[in-house]
Image: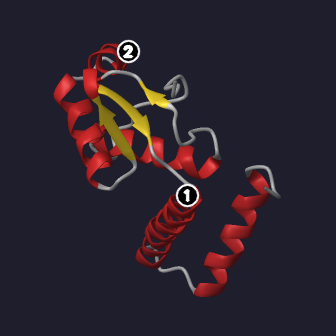
Amino acid sequence: MVSFEGFAISGSLPIYTQLILYIKRGIVAGTVCGGDELPSRRVLSALLGVNPNTVQKAYHLLEEEGIIESRSGARSFVTADGELKLRLRAELLEQDAAAWISAMKQMGLTREEALRMTEVMWDKTGGEA
């Protein structure tokens, strides 16, 4: 069963988008694997204190992307394989890097300043992965 213990709602993105990102990042990190069962829509909405339609929307979009599959009885499972994991990793890295670079450009940083800031933040958050 996929755990949502580490999930925290923030104000920056719609909650359904945050749920999608949480699952995708879990797949990339290896904490969410193919075959893992997701909580039912009702259980997850109660756990997180959100509208069931929010969870339904997230699950529906994940189904459309082929990341989860719903079976009889409304049970949903992750369908991730190695190829999907690589695709998601590239997609998430590109999105996050683009947002980071856009923010630094908006603040007027040069490429060199941005690279220095990246190195500082890398070290500050624990260094090597």
Residue 5, given in percent of the width and then of the height, sits at: 53, 22
x 34%, y 41%: residue: 69
Q: Name the residue under label 1.
A: 85
Question: Dot 2: what SS?
Answer: helix
Rendered position, 67 above or below 77? below
Rendered position, 125 above or below 10? below
x 54%, y 79%: residue: 109
Q: Mark 2 points at which residue?
A: 47
Question: Dot 1: what SS?
Answer: helix
Residue type pointed to by label 2: Leu
Q: How many labels does the image show?
A: 2
Residue 80, given in percent of the width and then of the height, sits at: 50, 50
Rendered position, 36 above or below 12? above
Dot 2 alpha-carbon crowd within 10 angstroms: few under 14, some 14 to 19, many 20 or more: few
Q: Along the line of sight, which residue is nearer the eye, 18 or 42?
A: 42
Residue 75, given in percent of the width and then of the height, sits at: 33, 25
Q: In this view, does 109 lie to the left or right of 31?
A: left
Name the outermost residue toward the right.
128
